[in-house]
Amino acid sequence: MLLNELRPGIKYECLSESGEPYAKFTMGVNIDDETFEGTATGGCLQYVWGMLCARMFAQVQARSWAKAAAAKSALAKLYNLSFSPFSTPLQPARTPSTPSSVDQMVLPQVLADHISRLVVNKFQVLIENHPTHSRRKVLAGIVMTTGLQMDDAIVISVATGTKCINGEHMSERGASLNDTHAEIIARRCLCDYLYTQLEMHMNP
């Protein structure tokens, strides 16, 4: 709504769409010869309800969410408006030279969206030939950046998962993974990456 008020007459277009079983849409809006993208999925509703009308509703809702994400990206870049949960809605983001304890936790929305796309795109590449693994509920990833420049950003880890093992399968000797939530697995991958870097550093 805000973007439409600031830039009357803008039009959104669907840049990409993936179908069953998880409808995923990428919507874009072009402003001043720059395209701002937003991606969303309606897979959860499809998975839970499993009905034709529910799938149609999920697709419509996913399109709406994707349009909202594209609008947030445009507002963040063009008007320096932050939509982070750590800041007041529609409050201009502080500059790096004047951080507060809360603002230090806030990433520019454009940067956050780009990191998200890097993780999702890496996941899509990994499962391209393994469609049975595409039914994810939670996706987590870690991206290494240098400052706010994203040209050299590297995806360190990508993980999915929502499970903890049952008590009878736990190992007191550490022979099993007790928690396989996506965030935990992504962190384990990061630790493995860091240890690998240390080994390389110690090797003449």
Image (cartoon, grey):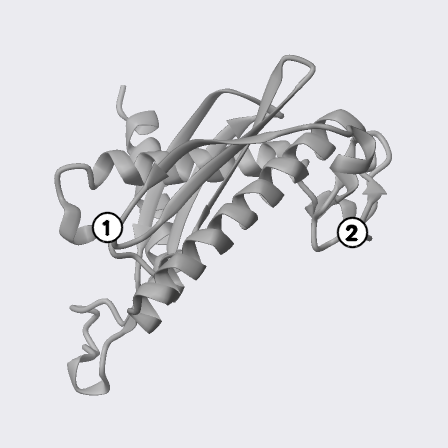
Q: Look at the picture and state if 70 lies above or below 100.
A: above
Q: Secondary structure at mark 2?
A: loop
**Which label number is shown at residue 197?**
none
| Position of residue 117 measured from the top left corner of the image (x, y, whole percent) | 45, 35
User: Label 1, label 2: how many angstroms apart (C-alpha)?
Assistant: 34 Å
**Which label number is shown at residue 87?**
2
Left or right? Give the position of 79 relative to 66.
right
Quarter of the image containing the N terminus? top right
Of 204 and 191, the residue lying toward us: 191
Question: How many circles with numbers are drawn on the protein?
Answer: 2
Residue depicted at 21% across the width and 69% down the height: 174
Amino acid bearing label 1: Ser
Q: Look at the picture and state if 112 lies above or below 10.
A: below
If you read the primary sequence from the N terminus, does the residue marked by circle 1 or circle 2 appear first? 2
Q: Residue furthest bottom?
A: 168
| Position of residue 97 measured from the top left corner of the image (x, y, whole percent) | 84, 29
Q: Look at the picture and state if 17 lies above or below 165.
A: above
Quarter of the image containing the C terminus? top left
Residue depicted at 36% across the width and 51% down the height: 186
Label 2 environment density (alpha carbons within 10 Å; few <14, some 14–19, many ≥20): some
Q: Quadrant of residue 176?
A: bottom left
Mark 1 or mark 2, which is nearer to you? 1
Of 18 and 173, the residue lying toward us: 18
**Which label number is shown at residue 134?**
1
Q: Look at the picture and state if 37 lies above or below 33.
A: below
Of 173 and 98, the residue lying toward us: 98
Label 1 environment density (alpha carbons within 10 Å; few <14, some 14–19, many ≥20): some
Q: Secondary structure at mark 1?
A: loop
Amino acid bearing label 2: Ser
